[in-house]
Image: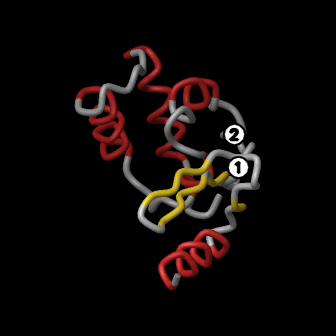
Amino acid sequence: MLRATTAAALVLLSGASLATASEPSVSANGVTLRSVTITYPTSSRDFPGPGADAINANCVTCHSAGMVFVQPPLSKQAWTDEVTKMRKVYGAPVAEADVPEIVDYLAALKPGQ
């Protein structure tokens, strides 16, 4: 019972809502597993301003603007290396033609912007 209570407490603390009786559950050996619906915070915040078209079209698929805005300031070369890594190592579908606009935008960011 302590495990179930702890699990329920963790779910509630995480901001998730527990499944209702109408949602599926499975029981075996005295343990019941129920579906849980979790609502994550959302951010409708796109990258603002001039030069944001390429970064909004390519980067927000994986990265929120809010996450990028709290990164430390990096040089143009460091951002070029990061974007290249995203493309070459992680397979990000970013067109080569969009890289300069993305790098220029990122290099111009100020922390906390």
Left or right of 106, for residue 99: left
Camera-side residue: 34 or 7? 34
Looking at this view, name the residue that lies furthest to the left.
89
Identify the mark at residue 42; answer none if there is no mark.
1
- Amino acid type assigned to the residue bearing label 1 in the image: Thr
Read off the residue under disc 2: 46
Which quadrant of the figure has residue 44? top right
- Quarter of the image where the C terminus is located: bottom right
Q: Looking at the image, is 89 positioned above or below residue 37?
A: above
Left or right of 72, for residue 43: right
Residue 56 in the image, given as x and y percentages of width and height = 61, 30
Residue 71 in the image, given as x and y percentages of width and height = 48, 59
Identify the mark at residue 8; answer none if there is no mark.
none
Left or right of 43, for residue 29: left
Residue 60 in the image, given as x and y percentages of width and height = 57, 35
Q: Residue at x 55, y 54 (%)?
A: 67
Which quadrant of the figure has residue 61? top right
- Amino acid type assigned to the residue bearing label 2 in the image: Asp
Decide: few, some or many residues near mark 1? Use Cα within 10 Å; few <14, some 14-19, many ≥20: few
Q: Secondary structure at mark 2?
A: loop
Looking at this view, name the residue that lies furthest to the bottom.
2
Q: Looking at the image, is 111 positioned above or below residue 87?
A: below
Which quadrant of the figure has residue 46? top right
